[in-house]
Image (cartoon, grey):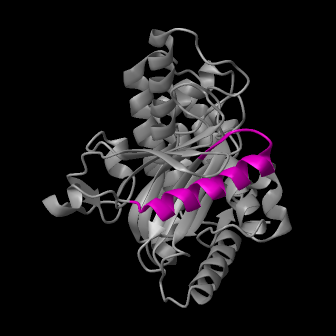
Amino acid sequence: MLTIRFDEQTSLDTRLVGGKALGLAQMTQSGLPVAPGFTVSTQAYFRHLEESGLRRRIIELLADIDHGDIHALEAAEATIRAWFDEGDFPPAILAELTDAYDDLCERCTTHNISVAVRSSATAEDAKGASFAGEYDTFVGMRGVEEVALYIRRCWASAYTSRSMAYAWKNGIEPSEVDMAVVVQKTVNASAAGVMFTLSPLTGDRSRIAIEATYGLGLSVVGGEVTPDRYVVSKIGLDLVEKVLGEKAIEYLDGTTVADVEPARRSQYCLSDDQAVALAKLGKTLERQHGHPVDIEFAIDRDLPAGSNVILLQCRPETYWSGRHAAASAAPIVNAAQAVIENSLRHLKH
């Protein structure tokens, strides 16, 4: 099982697809609006490591490395990244990838469709722990050859100096990380952002908080804009608060940045109806998961109003879940900052 569509039953096996792909499969199979795609499974990853000889070479390279020596880790990262870049897929993996990508193009009626290639490690979105943000995502890949290269680069991100140090800190050997990769139709986003099904400021579960900006969410991740903020009551789905952000730039794709003209800066990037529609989806996802969730979304400019809200990811909310809101103002501010920073690490991936 080397590639798995989101709508296939085996896409619900976390060991095969990892946390990110599992969330996408659950939403897809629940009839929620998700951009179509497939997962290159953990089996494909380990098969590539074994058949290419990379697993042995990586283990040998890391055997005597000083885990605390950042320069040694960075040198190992560069070497391993080059190995993944230079290697080709085993024929069986390339054949399945080609079939899966061609099938996605056919489903979307687009030749050489643009896709996002996103890491999906099995520990990446685990409840109560988070490897999320440690691995890479790439946007705007076209054609099987380019997609194959960036799948290998997602795999290589298990061996960045940062991700290796994080794995060792948690008692995991980097070569034992189960790494799947999501390949998903790129959303032509007019706006994007993140939604919490509780208040990130207080942990109040009666509120749904939404942060959004024009284009892709990369400008929020880089601290280049202050997003618009919306708060919707969970009971009644009333928009109870809006705060206009400063949105001077937008990412049109993974690399192209454009200035936002002054007239648009003074407008909210989401309509009130879109904010309420997102909150309704958030309630549905929280009910399905049985706990508060942290959701990424985009508004697809290619789709008609009313059906253009696309869900990109859903994972457990890990900061406030299971605890009471802090009693004093200072801890509340610190908690909010921690929640937002954790979400931004996810949003970039």
What segment carries the magenta color? 270-294
Q: Nearer the viewer, residue 14 or 84?
A: 14
Magenta-span inclusion, residue 285: yes
For the stretch drawn in magenta, the main secondary structure is helix
Residue extending farthest to the left is: 262
Instruction: Note whether 228 is above or below 304 in the view shown.
Output: above
Instruction: Note whether 289 is above or below 184 in the view shown.
Output: above
Q: Is residue 135 shown to the viewer in this render?
A: yes
Left or right, 64 with reference to 227: right
Q: Nearer the viewer, residue 327 or 86?
A: 327
Identify the residue shown where x is 39% and y is 61%. 191
Residue extending farthest to the right is: 9
Residue 154, percent from left and from top: 52, 52
Q: Is residue 150 shown to the viewer in this render?
A: no
Identify the residue shown where x is 80% and y is 70%. 8
Can you say which quadrant of the picture contains the N terminus?
Answer: bottom right
Q: Quadrant of residue 21?
A: bottom right
Magenta-span inclusion, residue 319: no
Left or right, 83 with reference to 33: left
Q: Quadrant of residue 226?
A: top left
Identify the residue shown where x is 65% and y is 58%. 281
